[in-house]
Image (spheres, grey):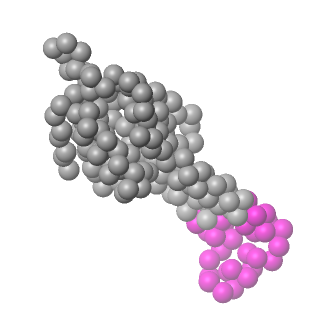
Amino acid sequence: MKIDNETTIYSIHNFKLILAIVVIIYLILMLVSPLPDFIEKHTGITAGWAIGIVIMAYILFFAYFILKGTAYFSYNDDGAKIIIRTFRINTLGSKKLSIEINKGEFHKYQVNKGRLKEEITLFVRKGTKISKYPPLSIVSLTREQKKALLDTLDKWVETKEKTN
């Protein structure tokens, strides 16, 4: 089975680009048009505050996705291995992570939910040792994709743990 959230990530990325263009146009209009006078006359907010509010809103928008841990997530178990590729979509270069697990070595998974974050941790068994992969963000998967992922992992799991 193959699962990925490429469409969701492209939508977020495109919205970020459109929002950046809108903010730039707003800033240009604030500098070269009578818009600051209009805003101050109708709202009482000075040009400096109006610019500051828009820039702060833009920064908070980006911070939300960084704090949430929004990430590209791709899962494929069509072959002899479970293959997961992921990377966070923050603005500072994020690490791309590729995990390949032999299906016979997959031990369990654990889902951790927080206020903004939702992560899955995978465990593998090699002989008598159990190793743990770093948590992977699944917050940007749709509800259907999460269900399909967990149902598919259940086929390969020795032990399942879900925590809230």
Question: Is 1 left or right of 13, judged from the image as shown?
Answer: left
Asked if residue 57 lies left or right of residue 114, the reply is: right
Note whether 58 is above or below 133 in the view shown: below
Q: Nearer the viewer, residue 35 or 157?
A: 157
**Residue at (76% x, 76% y) in the render:** 35
Decide whether residue 39 is among the magenta residues. Answer: yes
Pinpoint residue 77: horizontal percent, then vertical percent: 40, 33
Residue 25 position, x and y percent, is 76, 64
Q: Residue at x 30, y 55 (%)?
A: 115
Vertical comparison of 79 with 116: above or below: above
Q: Which residues are magenta?
A: 24-53
Task: Find residue 29 and report its horizontal and vertical position in percent.
Answer: 78, 68
Query: What's the residue at 17%, 40% (across, down)?
Result: 161
Is there any visible trace of residue 71 in the rendered image? Answer: no
Q: Which of the two residues, 100 or 54, is positioned nearer the viewer here?
A: 100
Taking the magenta stretch, the answer to whether it contains residue 65 is no
11 sits to left or right of 154: right
Frontmost residue, 5 versus 157 = 157
